[in-house]
Amino acid sequence: MIRTRTWIVIIAALAVAAAGAILLIRFFGAPGTTAEIVKGGEVLYTIDLDKVTTEYEIEIGDEDGDRNTVTVRPGMICVSSADCPDKICVNTGWASKNHPYPIICMPHELIIRIVGAEGEADAEAG
Amino acid sequence: MAKRIVTDAVLAAVALVLFVIEAQIPPVVPIPGVKLGLANIVTVWALIRIGAPDALGITLVRIALGSIFTGTVPSFVFSLSGGLLAFVAILLLRKLLKEDQIFVAGVIGAIFHNAGQLTAAAIMYGTASVFVWSPVLILSGILTGLFTGLVAQLLAKKIPRSIGARRN
């Protein structure tokens, strides 16, 4: 039998490894500055965030009446408002090269991801 | 047999109530997939105290009814993939755990639940980029799993063994 102390050490080590991975993601960021807005598995927009000079908004709607408003600023992108029930996509906040966490709106099957200049293949390698 | 069906049905109802109540609470952390996972308490307790077939049945009934009451089609797929992976992980691990180590099953269940959800999301959205969230979800899984696991451990201590025990 494994001792309780050993289990606690295993769990603590896992927590430290996860925290380390979070720091690495923060330090290295995404391999590129391109954002892709994907809905229902289809890439709707590809935006190089480094080339954005002025803030603008994109309305993403569908025939079900689902709506997400995406705001694009130089270097960053977010969902600024949505009519989904949980608002997780809005509350996730900005995604950028240094904060490359994909924004997911599960009820609307919408995802915004940061990829390399060549697209998804680079993002997976990173 | 009748006692077994009643026990499992009551446990499925308990898990369903926990699931539905939790779904009414607005998300505390703005991270997709992070939640307390109170229904995990029932799965862990049933797996340790009753047995694998009963625990699987309870979990499947809870996921199916929970999705009908609260969810959408994608949320059903996420619940199912997360719930099944968590179940298998705890099943493989439980022989290694002593009475005062049930909390470990909670942690393993929570981490693998999140892993199953992320994998389902990666397939559903057709993108591996969702795995960027995995370190965050491992950390949150450890915290929520410690909570649900400790509750399950406390319940295993307090609830008489005769409840759920197999006689046939």
Image: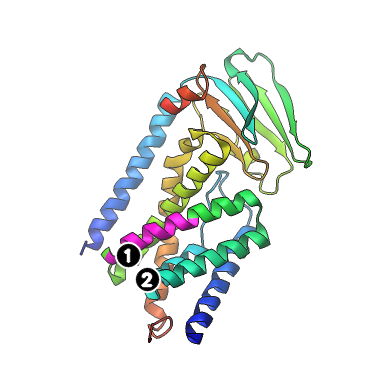
In x, y percent, where is residue B106?
40, 61
Q: Residues within 10 Å of mark 1 (few under 14, many from 20)?
A: some
* Residue under the image location 40 percent in, 84 percent down: B160
Q: Quadrant of residue B152?
A: bottom left
Callout 1–callout 2 Cβ contact below 8 Å: yes
Residue B67, percent across and down?
63, 59
Task: Indicate the chain on which mark 2 is placed.
Answer: B
Residue B168 position, x and y percent, is 38, 86
The answer to whether residue B159 is magenta is no
- Residue B111 spot, x, y in % from top left: 42, 51
Three-letter code for the amino acid on which mark 2 is drawn: Ile
Q: Is residue A34 above or below residue B50?
A: above
Q: Residue at coordinates 71% horizontally, 45% vertically from top-left? A: A84
Identify the secondary structure beneath mark 1: helix
Q: Which stretch is magenta? A: B83-95
Could you say which disc has been placed on residue B94 in the image? Answer: 1
The quarter of the displayed image where residue A36 is located? top right
Determine the secondary structure under disc 2: helix
Residue at the (73%, 26%) spot, across then down: A58
Q: Is residue B125 visible?
A: yes
Residue B107 visible in image: no
Picture residue at 56% right of the left edge, 66% below the top: B62
Task: Report crowding for label 2: few under 14, some 14 to 19, many 20 or more residues within 10 A (C-alpha).
Answer: many
Relative placement, left or right, of B155 versus A58 is left
Label 1: chain letter: B
Q: Of residues B157 and B108, which is closer to you in this image?
A: B108
Which secondary structure type mostly characterizes the magenta part of the structure? helix
Q: CA distance from mark 1 to mark 2?
A: 7 Å
Find disc 2 in the rendering and name its residue: B48
Nearest the viewer among A83 and A44 is: A44
Q: Quadrant of residue A34?
A: top right
